[in-house]
Image (spheres, rainbow, N blue to C red):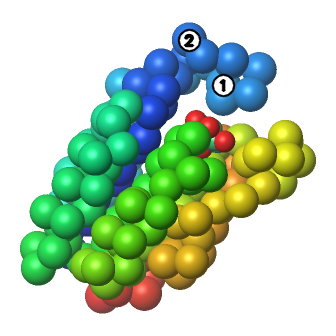
Amino acid sequence: MKIKVINGPNLNMLGIREPGIYGSESYGALCAMINEHCEKLGIEVELQQSNHEGDLVDYIQQSYGCIDGIVINPGAYTHTSIAILDAAKAVGIPMIEVHISDVASREDFRQVSYIRAACEKTITGHGLQGYIEAIDFLFEKYGK
Ligand code: DQA
């Protein structure tokens, strides 16, 4: 099984940005945790992060035909990007939406998720562990 974990804007600032909301672990630590978990399960994983909307569209498009599942945290683009939703719908790859924070209990402008319409499951508020839960879900459903 081959998956991608795609992170959007400001997630490269994990550990620095609002640690009370996003925790004290760095993006590097998140990548290490994901790599270790995937290695244990025998999953091939590619990690991608960008602060640019079009890059996220490219990462999704480039997955077509070669990736079995995508875990995505589009950051703030969750709440604004029809282009990322359209890319997800275009490739039709099983996708799980992850948010580190509990977006449901935050500001009104975070209550809309465009990407959700293309995702099999949404995991919010479980911290970095949410990425692991998303990977496990994909593995259980598509990895065996
Ligand atoms: C986030 C939640 C978004 O509202 C925010 O813009 C982020 C991170 C999360 O992981 O909790 O950048 O996606």
Please state the horizontal and vertical placement of residue 10, each as a whole percent of the image: 48, 27
**Residue at x 26% of width, y 79% of height:** 91
Three-letter residue code for mark 1: Gly
Please state the horizontal and vertical placement of residue 54, each as a whole percent of the image: 28, 47
Please state the horizontal and vertical placement of residue 79, each as a whole percent of the image: 62, 52
**Residue at x 33% of width, y 36% of height:** 52
Vertical order, 39 against 17 (above or below): below
**Residue at x 11% of width, y 73% of height:** 66
Query: What residue sits right under mark 2 in the picture?
Result: 16
Query: Number of marks in the image?
Result: 2
- Give the mark toward the camera: 1 or 2: 2
Three-letter residue code for mark 2: Ile
How far, Cα to Cα, is label 1 from label 2?
Answer: 9 Å
**Residue at x 11% of width, y 79% of height:** 65
Vertical order, 49 against 57 (above or below): above
| SS category of the residue bearing label 2 | loop
Question: Camera-side residue: 50 or 87?
Answer: 87
Query: The C terminus is located in which quarter?
Result: bottom left
> Which label is found at residue 23?
1
Vertical order, 66 against 124 (above or below): below
